[in-house]
């Protein structure tokens, strides 16, 4: 039962990270880049294995692996900022 709960929790965290990565990409690229569509196999058919992004019809498409990378980077930078602000406030 514990393994099932851990798998469900990790799945929810992964969806959150991918969604965050998609929003960061959309905001930072001003809508010129887009994330991979969930219902299609775009990355599998149009890019190299393990690619973080690829070009499709002149538009940069970020794969799910790229979205996880960007999402983790965002939350990592957010944690560093929170620690820096807490140290600054306590000084």
Image (cartoon, grey):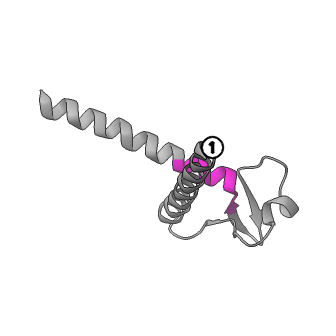
**Which residue ends up furthest to the right in the rendered image?**
45
Residue 79 vertical position relative to residue 8 in the rendered view, above or below: above
Near mark 1 (Cα within 10 A), the count class, few <14, some 14-19 or many ≥20, is: few
Q: Residue furthest top?
A: 91
Instruction: Work out which quarter of the rendered image holds the C terminus and state it.
Output: top left
Dominant secondary structure (helix, strand or loop) of the stretch shown in magenta: helix
Q: Position of residue 40 (x, y in %)?
A: 78, 71
Instruction: Tell me the residue that label 1 is attached to.
Output: 3
Identify the image quadrant of residue 62: bottom right
The residue under the point 84% across, 59% down is: 44
> Which is more toward the observer, 87 or 3?
3
> Measuring 68% from the left and 63% from the top, which residue is drawn there?
60
Q: Pinpoint residue 29: horizontal percent, then vertical percent.
A: 53, 63
> Disc count in the image?
1
Residue 73 is left or right of residue 53, and the answer is: left
Q: Which residues are magenta?
A: 61-71
Seen from the viewer's position, the closer of residues 17 and 26 is 17
Residue visible at 54% across and 60% down? Answer: 25
Check the image and report above or below for 79 versus 21. Answer: above
- Based on the picture, tell me whether residue 70 belongs to the magenta stretch: yes
Residue 81's spot in the image, x, y percent? 32, 39
Which secondary structure, mark 1? helix
Q: Position of residue 78 (x, y in %)?
A: 38, 44
- Is 4 positioned to the left or the right of 85 in the image? right
Closer to the camera in the image, 8 or 14: 8
The residue lying furthest to the front in this view is 1
């Amino acid at each position: 039962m514990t393994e099932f709960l851990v798998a469900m929790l990790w799945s929810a965290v992964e969806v959150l990270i991918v969604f965050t990565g998609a929003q960061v990409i959309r905001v930072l690229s001003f809508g010129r880049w887009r994330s991979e569509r969930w219902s299609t196999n775009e990355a599998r058919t149009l890019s190299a294995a393990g690619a973080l992004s690829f070009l499709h019809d002149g538009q940069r498409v970020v794969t799910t692996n790229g979205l996880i990378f960007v999402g983790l980077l965002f939350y990592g930078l957010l944690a560093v900022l929170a620690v820096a602000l807490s140290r600054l406030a306590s000084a």
